[in-house]
């Protein structure tokens, strides 16, 4: 029987300079649908998960993000060579900017920092109503708020009725309902679309 990987030991080693660190995706999925999933099993129902942080990046040093949650709580997120980053697509640490929103999953270190194994930057998961379709944009309504969805060549994909994702968005219909996973453009009503789930 294979031994289970000890995430705390692995990430502690990364923070302290250990060698041979595997990519964080070995510890869990980086798929955008996984953001917010994987709560620690030891967390009481309704209690915050100490190994998960969401908020807005208010500062950055070389390897530490300072993040403020919606309730005003300040967090320090430690980036390691094994931290996986999603920002519309899997990407690199240098794409993270002050002002971005994030979800981070990792392991809480003794000093209180969260050593991140996965970070999702500006991710949104919206239930929408398609109000207009253009060549490179979708006009969307999310609970009465207007949203502009940008179609990103080589990235945006559609899933129709649960079929595999395709780059062809031509089967989307005005008036149809959909779910959009994408990357918010901070301080705007605009989203770059990663995947749109809709009925054909």
Image: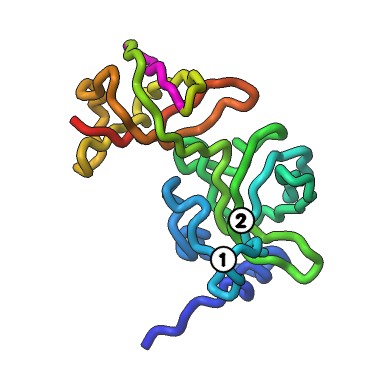
Rendered image: mark on residue 81: 2
Magenta segment, prevailing SS (helix, strand or loop): strand
Residue 20 visible within the image: no
Q: Residue at x 40, y 29 (%)?
A: 128
Helix, strand or loop at mark 1? loop
Q: Residue at x 61, y 71 (%)?
A: 44
Q: Say if 134 sits above or below 172 in the image.
A: above
Q: Position of residue 52 (x, y in %)?
A: 62, 58
Residue under label 1, please give it. 21
- Tell me which segment is drawn in magenta: 135-142
Q: For the N terminus, which image quadrant?
A: bottom left
Q: Residue at x 60, y 71 (%)?
A: 43
Image quadrant where residue 42 sits: bottom right
Q: Say if 13 sits above or below 191 in the image.
A: below
Query: Is 89 a magenta residue?
Result: no
Q: Nearer the viewer, residue 52 or 72?
A: 72
Q: Position of residue 167 (x, y in %)?
A: 26, 29
């Amino acid at each position: 029987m294979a031994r289970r990987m000890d995430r705390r030991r692995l990430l502690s080693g990364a923070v302290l300079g250990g060698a041979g660190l595997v990519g964080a995706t070995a510890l869990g999925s980086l798929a955008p649908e996984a953001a917010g999933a994987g709560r620690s099993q030891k967390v009481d129902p309704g209690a915050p998960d100490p190994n998960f942080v969401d908020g807005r990046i208010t500062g950055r040093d070389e390897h530490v993000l300072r993040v403020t949650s919606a309730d005003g709580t300040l967090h320090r997120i430690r980036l390691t060579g094994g931290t996986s980053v999603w920002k519309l697509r899997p990407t690199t640490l240098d794409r993270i900017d002050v002002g971005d929103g994030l979800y981070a999953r990792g392991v809480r270190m003794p000093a209180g920092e969260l050593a991140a194994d996965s970070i999702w930057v500006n991710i949104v998961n919206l239930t929408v109503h398609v109000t207009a379709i253009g060549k490179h944009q979708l006009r969307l309504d999310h609970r009465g708020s207007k949203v502009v969805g940008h179609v990103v060549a080589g990235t945006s994909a559609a899933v129709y009725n649960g079929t595999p994702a395709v780059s062809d968005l031509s089967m989307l219909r005005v008036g149809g309902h959909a779910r959009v996973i994408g990357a918010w453009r901070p301080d705007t009503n605009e989203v770059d679309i990663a995947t749109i789930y809709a009925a054909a």
